[in-house]
Amino acid sequence: MEFRESLVRAGLCGVLFALPACGDERKPSGEQSTGTVGDSAPRLEPAEQLRARARIVGPPGSGIKGEVTFIELKGNFPAPGVDIEATISGPPGELKPGNHGLHIHATAKGGCVPPYTSAEGHFDPGPAGNTDPDVNHPFHMGDIPNLVVDRLGVGAMEARTSRITLSPGPLSVFDQDGSVVIVHADPDRGIPGPVKSGVSGGARIACGVIQLIEESR
């Protein structure tokens, strides 16, 4: 299991993640789509490359916006890797400088309606899964590194994971009820904690439904 993050050194479990840092900084883009995803994963051949994105937005009147993109890599089957890149910004009063929990949540069935509780817990499929945001953290399949926000309110994150797929399978984010990305008010401390302890990031301040955007052979 490996994460590669080239923008930030995240505070998740060092045994599971390798996160070399570099000095690149990127600007956010995109506006929110609040629609829900389809009922099932895209029916695609293993040789295809898949791309998806979540357009992030805060509650009405908020200045938080941005995009999280996903690219499933070719040639890695039966265990594909997925590159994830987030560029999200907001007024410093809304998206304060520092680390913010950033996770894939279990369901898109309610879209992205504040306070985003319809997204339920962290994406963690399977009979042994535990979607509670704080319990079994940071070992959920939807746990990814913190979004790191600078003093101007510009946040970025890059990582590579084999915990999820875009293609059909038991770890696909395009399962029956879809998935969303949630931005949290506080840092993800990268440790497990009691139910509602907030160790994974606390309040939910922005959301985006993950949607397939491109397929190429």
Image (cartoon, rainbow, N blue to C red):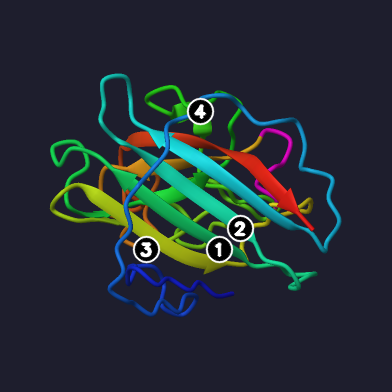
Q: Which residue is mark 1?
A: 83
If you read the primary sequence from the N terminus, does the residue marked by circle 2 or circle 3 appear first? 2
Q: Is residue 119 left or right of residue 162?
A: left
If you read the primary sequence from the N terminus, does the residue marked by circle 3 or circle 1 appear first? 1
Q: Which mark is residue 33?
A: 4
Q: Which residue is mark 3?
A: 191
The type of residue carrying mark 4 is Ser
Local secondary structure at mark 4:
loop
Q: Residue at x 26, y 26 (%)?
A: 62
Q: Which residue is mark 2?
A: 71
Q: Is residue 176 left or right of residue 63?
A: right
Q: Main secondary structure of the magenta part?
A: loop
Local secondary structure at mark 3:
loop
Disc nearest the viewer among 3 and 4 = 4
Q: Residues within 10 Å of mark 4 (few under 14, many from 20)?
A: some
Disc nearest the viewer among 2 and 3 = 2
Local secondary structure at mark 2:
strand
If you read the primary sequence from the N terminus, does the residue marked by circle 1 or circle 2 appear first? 2
